[in-house]
Image (cartoon, rainbow, N blue to C red):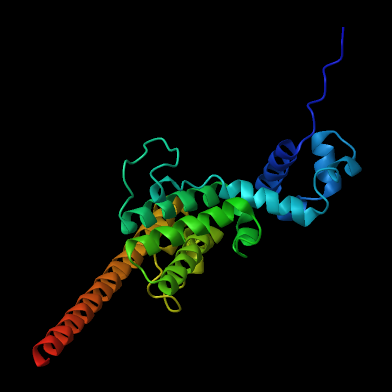
């Protein structure tokens, strides 16, 4: 009876195994020796596909970024429910932020590397390009569009770094009323981790987008006032001539 063939080693298989290892045991567990053992291959064979551990880690991070939905920025991008026209920028940012957070929540151990920026990672650069392009096309000045993209990344990655609720001990005895008069029920937070963390994210997202909408309205108003002043000046010049 023929022996089962070992699956062909390729970049996709290596990245998938590396991501599973990081998900299960954290970044510190990722090494060439450990990954080779997981794949039942020799360590040097991995170097045929990735020259360094950093190159492999970049590919793992970029694979996670590839899970983020960008269809709200481009109606031509395949998605479960494609839109026939561009999504208004506040809703596009909301939908994207939720998808972004979901991808990071599925792989929390990779967040510290991802938070460093896109680097040369294709999926991460496509994400940055999509967000920036959509905001500029919606009427945001390029400089402000850049800052909004950075702001959203700070917010989403920060929300995915750790659980706020899980950081509170479940021992009620920790919270002495004399020292912490307002934390009498803090020991219950960890029990409601998902609701607390999800609610905090949505509250922050609402506040952030509400503020950006107000800023955009002021920007438009200044633009209209400038146009009226320019037109008035042209009219006065015509009358004077």
In the foreground, 9 or 240: 240
Quadrant the C terminus occupies: bottom left
- Residue 138, compared with residue 231, is above or below; it is above
Where is residue 191? Give x, y as percent. 45, 52
Q: Residue furthest top?
A: 1
Q: Position of residue 59 (x, y in %)?
A: 69, 49
In the depicted view, which residue is nearer to us: 184 or 198? 198
Side of 45 where 111 appears, left or right: left
Q: Is residue 198 above or below residue 135?
A: above
Q: Position of residue 75 (x, y in %)?
A: 38, 44
Q: Is residue 13 left or right of residue 4?
A: left
> Which residue is pictured at 28% across the width and 75% down the height?
219
Residue 85: x and y in percent read 31, 45
> Residue at horizontal 56%, vertical 46%?
66
The answer to whether residue 212 is above or below residue 241 is above
Q: Is residue 26 visible?
A: no
């Amino acid at each position: 009876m023929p022996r089962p063939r070992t699956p062909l080693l390729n970049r996709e298989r290596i990245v998938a195994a590396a991501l599973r290892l990081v998900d299960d045991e954290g970044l510190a567990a990722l090494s060439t020796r450990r990954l080779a053992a997981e794949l039942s291959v020799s360590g040097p064979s991995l170097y045929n596909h990735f020259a360094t551990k950093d190159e492999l880690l970049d590919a793992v991070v970029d694979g996670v970024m590839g899970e983020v939905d960008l269809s709200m920025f481009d109606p031509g991008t395949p998605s479960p429910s494609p839109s026939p026209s561009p999504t208004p920028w506040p809703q596009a940012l909301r939908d994207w932020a939720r998808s972004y957070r979901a991808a990071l929540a599925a792989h929390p151990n990779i967040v510290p590397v991802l938070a460093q920026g896109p680097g040369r990672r294709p999926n991460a650069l496509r994400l940055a390009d999509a967000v920036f392009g959509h905001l500029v096309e919606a009427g945001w000045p390029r400089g402000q569009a850049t800052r909004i993209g950075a702001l959203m990344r700070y917010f989403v990655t920060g929300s995915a770094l750790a659980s706020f609720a899980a950081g509170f001990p479940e021992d009620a005895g920790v919270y002495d009323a004399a020292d912490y008069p307002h934390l009498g029920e803090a020991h219950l937070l960890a029990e409601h981790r998902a609701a607390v963390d999800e609610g905090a994210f949505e509250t922050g997202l609402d506040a952030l987008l509400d503020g950006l909408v107000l800023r955009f309205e002021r920007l438009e108003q200044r633009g209209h006032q400038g146009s009226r002043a320019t037109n008035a000046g042209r009219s006065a010049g015509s009358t004077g001539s």
